Image (cartoon, grey):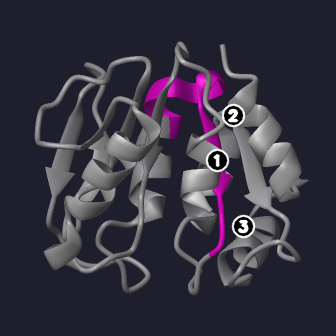
């Protein structure tokens, strides 16, 4: 699914895209390098103190929470698991919401636990845009359903609407 969405990106876009996948640490860079080759994009795994740049797709490294800092850089943290996850989607959404406020757009897609729901609610509270994959389209609907329940006005989009969003990025 991620490959489908990222494959729709224009050749240049003004935003940075951050992705948190729950995965085993031994597969840390395989996804990023294969996607970068396949899609011919700026796709990378985040390292500590890395500056956030437009026209990049960033992946949270396995085993670390990904945080957005006030100086528009990333930091990595290996504190306790949140919702049985490290990296946690909640951590990324919460820190991105606090820094980017109304400019933050967060997507919560298919997944097997409630990680991301509370962070999505914070994105919404800071005036950002909260978008949830329609649970009917999700391979596993637990995360989207949790996101809908945790927010008051999240947009619920089917896959075609999500693809259109990425295709239309400027």
Q: Residue at x 41, y 66 (%)?
A: 21
Residue interval drawn in magenta: 97-110
Q: Is residue 28 left or right of residue 125?
A: left
Few, some or many residues within 10 Å of mark 1 (<14, 14–19, 20+): some
Q: Which residue is mark 2?
A: 166
Residue 5 — which label? 1
* Relative to 29, 105 lies left or right: right
Q: From this viewpoint, which residue is outermost toward the front?
A: 38
- Where in the figure is residue 53, as x and y percent of width and height? 33, 19
Q: What SS does tag 2 mark?
A: helix
User: Which residue is at 12% across, 32% downward?
Assistant: 49
Which numbered mark, 1 or 3, is in the foreground of this view?
A: 1
Task: Count the marks.
Answer: 3
Reply above or below: 93 against 42: below
- Indicate which disc, 2 or 1, sits on the residue closer to the N terminus: 1
User: How far across and how far down the image is residue 105, in percent?
Assistant: 64, 36
Q: CA distance from mark 1 to mark 3?
A: 19 Å
Q: In this figure, which residue is indicated by the disc labeled 3? A: 147
The Cα–Cα distance between marks 2 and 1, rounded to whole angstroms, is 7 Å
- Write down the quadrant of residue 163 in the picture: top right
């Amino acid at each position: 699914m991620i490959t489908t969405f990222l494959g729709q990106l224009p050749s240049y876009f003004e935003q940075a895209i951050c992705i948190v996948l729950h995965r085993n640490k031994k597969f840390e860079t395989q996804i990023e390098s294969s996607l970068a080759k396949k899609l011919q994009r700026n796709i990378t795994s985040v390292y500590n103190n890395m500056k956030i740049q437009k026209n990049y797709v960033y992946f949270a490294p396995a085993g670390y929470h990904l945080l957005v800092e006030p100086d528009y850089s990333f930091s990595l943290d290996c504190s306790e698991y949140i919702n049985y996850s490290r990296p946690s989607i909640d951590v990324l959404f919460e820190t991105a919401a606090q820094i980017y406020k109304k400019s933050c757009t967060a997507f919560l897609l298919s997944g097997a636990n409630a990680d991301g729901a509370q962070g999505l609610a914070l994105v919404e509270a800071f005036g950002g845009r909260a978008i949830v994959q329609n649970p009917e389209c999700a391979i596993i609907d637990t995360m989207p359903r949790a996101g809908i329940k945790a927010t008051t006005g999240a947009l619920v989009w089917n896959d075609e609407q999500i693809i259109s969003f990425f295709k239309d990025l400027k």
